[in-house]
Amino acid sequence: MTGVSTRVWLLLAGLAGCDFLWCAALKMGLSHWWPLALASLALLGLTLGCRLSGAGPRIAAIAEWILLWLIFSVAGALLTYLAAAQDRPVYDARLALADADLGFHWAAWLDFVVAHPVFKLILAVPYHSLVAQVVLSIVWLSWCGRDDRNAELLINTTLALLMTTAVFFLFPTLGPCVGVPACQNAYLEDLVGLRHGSLPSLDIMLLKGVIPFPSFHAVLAMLFTYAHRGSRVFVPVAAFNTLMLLSIPSEGGHYLVDVLGGVAVGGLAILMTRVLPARAPELTPATTG
């Protein structure tokens, strides 16, 4: 743990604590957690070994940030599953109407994308790039000595996840692709099972993204791009993530307003971390006269 990463460790500890208390309240069981534990121990051992020996500070930083993202991914996904375990009325009709007001028709867009396989492939690549973008961002920022950017990216992402989950909890949706087999396998089966109470136990290794609105892919497109500002890779990262924003409705089964909502959440997370102080203010001794 370094000074830069301390805040992230504390933030993720709080997130994991919320998960534990919520699981206990819902009597939700967890299974197959041991691969996560083994991977975490291996990354922790690599981090400590490189740091204590002084042989590879950059490798130590990369291992630590991968470990933190691994913890975030599981704790964050678990939080979204717990938020989905409710039977409140869904707001899909209102979101579909908002899409129509914007001139966007999801079924027509999906038909167009499916009818053009090359275009669909171009959209599928960025949509499924989240893990690759996380790892490449960690490696690039660590290699450039920008642990502050690594911390900023993960703090922004965690804050955005909390906001996304809160919106989803208050305004649950199923998404526009109910009845589409690909979406059923991707997330709808779990989401419907959570709403109906038919998932009393969660397999840690099979957690998926179950929040349609706001789109967390859109959130991450914003945050990945922002993390590389001022860098020589900013333009390609921005272009790639713009393409990911375009891919979200068809590849992820989202309303257009899901994407706009995710962009708004990502922007708000960035604004919050820019406004909040990065560290506690220093205390100056009082003077007497």
Image (tube, rainbow, N blue to C red):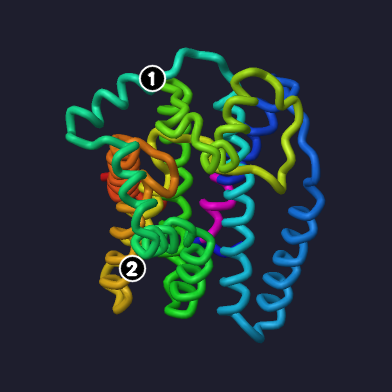
Q: Secondary structure at mark 2?
A: helix
Is residue 260 among the parts visible in the rendering? yes
Residue pointed to by mark 2: 237
Tell me which numbered mark, 2 or 1, is placed earlier along the sequence: 1
Q: In the image shown, does 285 or 40 lie closer to the viewer? A: 40
Q: Which residues are magenta?
A: 5-11
Q: Residue at x 63, y 60 (%)?
A: 67
Question: Could you say where residue 280 lies in the image, as x and y percent from the top left?
Answer: 41, 49
Is residue 226 visible to us here? no
Q: Is residue 74 toward the left or the right of residue 262 in the image?
A: right
- SS at badge 1: loop
Q: Quadrant of the C terminus?
A: top left
Residue occupying image coordinates x 78% and y 46%: 33
Nearest the camera: 129 or 287?
A: 129
Look at label 2 and name its amino acid. Val
* Image quadrant where residue 47 sits: bottom right
- Is residue 14 found left or right of 89 in the rendered image? right
Residue at the extreme front of the image, as rendered:
115
Q: How far, Cα to Cα, is label 2 from label 1?
A: 33 Å
Name the residue at 47% across, 27% down. 174
The spot of residue 204 in percent (x, y) is 71, 44
Left or right? Give the position of 37 relative to 130.
Answer: right
Q: Quadrant of residue 83?
A: top right
Mark 1 crowdedness (10 Å alpha carbons): few <14, some 14-19, many ≥20: some
- State the residue lying farthest toward the bottom: 55
Look at mark 1 in the image and give the residue it sits on: 91
Query: Measured from the top left, where is residue 144 in percent x and y?
Result: 42, 79
For label 2, the crowd category at 10 Å Cα-Cα, with few meaning under 14, some 14 to 19 and many 20 or more, is: many
- Residue 8 lies within the magenta run: yes
Image label count: 2
Where is the N terminus found, in terms of image quarters?
Answer: bottom right
Residue 203 image offset from top left, x and y in percent: 74, 40
